Image (cartoon, rainbow, N blue to C red):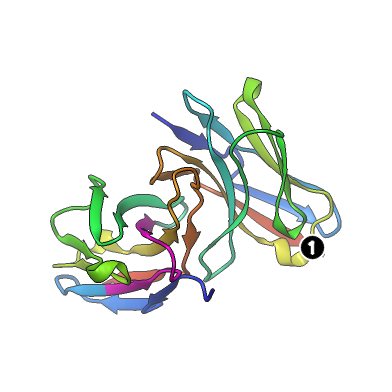
Amino acid sequence: AQSVTQPDIHITVSEGASLELRCNYSYGATPYLFWYVQSPGQGLQLLLKYFSGDTLVQGIKGFEAEFKRSQSSFNLRKPSVHWSDAAEYFCAVAVNDYKLSFGAGTTVTVRA
Amino acid sequence: DTGVSQNPRHKITKRGQNVTFRCDPISEHNRLYWYRQTLGQGPEFLTYFQNEAQLEKSRLLSDRFSAERPKGSFSTLEIQRTEQGDSAMYLCASSSWTGYSYEQYFGPGTRLTVT
């Protein structure tokens, strides 16, 4: 079955430092992959998506992600985090054309 | 485009009571989805509609749950005889299905607490 694993439950990073969030997927075919962010009390906001083509995708808020088929990974990165990036981040894979399967999420804390 | 809206944002109810949540999708979107998110977990798919037709229901959706989307616009999710295990965030999402667009746009959710 298609699934997503986010190995890190919680990451703390200093403001201005770089951030990398890991995501591993299990999927038989070419996956459609997403990263969403959820701030406290808010819904999920789509950061970026990968369908095909260039394996390095750019998203909103300065985030990027790299698809690596050989490693079944889709890691999210940001070169310099801001305090407003503190949130929970979810990686997801499209199981079919109507269902997304989400990882358990990674909580990011930004310290001053 | 005002985004997906959900009401109420919070609901506290006693065990055994019925509750109903409403979701208003982005206006031109023909698909609408319901997910449930429990503490420390990612959202889990419950059901979805294409226009007014409910096309898929997860096994998570017990017979106490019912969803409707009359006229293919807003949707309601009703939970009858609530149980403490129903406490969760209920998320609605919508999309414009064109055959190759898989991203879904989520609302702020309704947090249900069953006491």
Indicate yes or no whether the magenta region holds residue A47.
Answer: no
Q: Which of these two is toward me, B76 or B17?
A: B76
- Residue at far right of view: A16
Question: Which of the chains bears the disc numbered 1?
Answer: A
Q: Looking at the image, which residue is at 48% across and 55% down? A: B104
Q: Name the quadrant of the C terminus of chain A.
A: bottom right
| Direction from residue B34 to residue B13 in the image, left or right | left
Check residue B22 for magenta coloring: yes
Q: What element carries label 1?
A: loop
Residue drawn at x 60%, y 37% is A23
Give, as a three-letter code, the residue at label 1.
His
Q: Residue at x 63, y 24 (%)?
A: A69
Where are the magenta residues, as a range? B21-37
Q: Which of A101 and B69 is in front in this view?
A: B69
In the rendered view, would you say B55 is above or below A71? Answer: below
Q: Based on the displayed image, in which of its 4 quarters is residue A54 positioned?
A: top right
Q: Which residue lies furthest to the front in this view?
A: B98
Indicate the quadrant containing the N terminus of chain A: top left, top right, bottom left or bottom right: top left
Residue B50, picture quadrant: bottom left
Q: Is the magenta stretch mostly helix, strand or loop?
A: strand
Q: Left or right: where does residue B64 sit relative to residue A19?
A: left
Image position, residue B112 (x, y; %): 33, 70
| Crowding near the residue tagged with mark 1, few <14, some 14–19, many ≥20 C-alpha atoms within 10 Å | some
Q: Mark 1 points at which residue?
A: A82
Number of numbered markers: 1
Q: In the image, is residue B76 above or below residue A106?
A: below
- Residues A26 and B71: in front is B71
- Residue at 46% x, 50% y is B42
Residue B37 position within the rendered picture, expressed as x and y whole percent measured from the top left: 40, 57
Residue furthest toward the top? A70
